């Protein structure tokens, strides 16, 4: 990998664009096909350019710019692979940690795991304390995300035009905006 790309990635991680401009967060809310709400969060060095590019993309996919963040709650999500540790031990240890809100088992293509929902400001602290308490568990991912409220979720039928439009919008079959 070229040295310039590595230096550019380090600067972005520090909140500075390769050109030396400070990076800012841009949050865009829209209603997609089939009344599916979306919250798009970007980091950019030029809010106006990014806003215009996102507006163009969402309009091409049949979405409209409208407030939707009230349909979501920002949460920390930690996914772990339990290893030899049983779910009850993980549940008990997790709930003793300040900031843990929920603990659930999940099944995906990679096997069984446990997802821990946290207060966003405590995600890193919960993850660190969990690793200290349960050294056998492996952290698969740790993110802060917009989680949809259960009572406002919509169902999208598989193979429908709605699914196609949302996949195009989320999956990005449109040309990608320029990276910062």
Image (cartoon, rainbow, N blue to C red):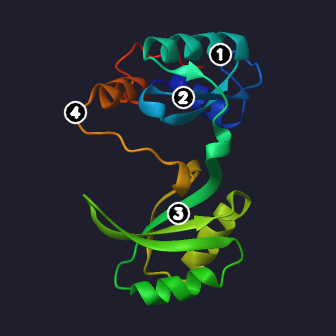
Image spot of residue 104 (x, y percent)? 46, 72
Q: What whole-number distance in Å separates the C-alpha atoms at marks 2 and 3?
A: 27 Å
Q: What whole-number distance in Å separates the C-alpha atoms at marks 4 and 2?
A: 20 Å
User: Which residue corresponds to mark 3?
Assistant: 78
Q: Quadrant of residue 174?
A: top left
The one of 23 and 118 positioned closer to us in this rendering: 118
Q: Decide: few, some or many residues near mark 3? Use Cα within 10 Å; few <14, some 14-19, many ≥20.
A: many
Q: What whole-number distance in Å separates the C-alpha atoms at marks 1 and 4?
A: 30 Å
Quick one: label 1 or label 4, which is nearer the N terminus? 1
User: Quadrant where the C terminus lies?
Assistant: top right
Quick one: label 1 or label 3, which is nearer the N terminus? 1
Q: For the residues carrying marks 2 and 1, which lies nearer the camera in this image?
A: 2
Image spot of residue 55 (x, y percent)? 58, 14
Are circles 1 and 3 on residues that touch, CB within 8 Å? no
User: Which residue corresponds to mark 4?
Assistant: 159
Label 3, secondary structure: give it: strand
The one of 29 and 113 positioned closer to us in this rendering: 29
Label 1, secondary structure: give it: helix
């Amino acid at each position: 990998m070229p040295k310039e790309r590595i230096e550019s990635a380090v600067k972005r991680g520090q909140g500075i664009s390769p050109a030396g401009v400070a990076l800012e967060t841009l949050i865009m809310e829209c209603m997609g096909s089939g009344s599916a709400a979306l919250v798009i969060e970007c980091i950019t060095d030029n809010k106006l350019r990014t806003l215009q590019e996102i507006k163009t993309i969402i309009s091409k996919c049949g979405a409209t710019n409208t407030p939707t963040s009230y349909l979501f709650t920002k949460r920390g999500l930690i996914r772990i692979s339990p290893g030899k540790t049983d779910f009850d031990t993980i549940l008990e240890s997790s709930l003793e940690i300040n900031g843990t809100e929920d603990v659930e088992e999940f099944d995906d293509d990679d096997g069984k795991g446990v997802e821990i929902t946290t207060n966003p400001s405590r995600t890193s602290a919960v993850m660190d304390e969990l690793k200290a308490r349960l050294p056998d568990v492996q952290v698969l991912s740790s993110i802060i995300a917009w989680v949809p409220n259960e009572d406002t979720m919509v169902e999208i039928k598989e193979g429908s035009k709605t699914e196609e439009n949302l996949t195009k919008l989320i999956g990005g079959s449109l040309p990608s905006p320029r990276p910062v």
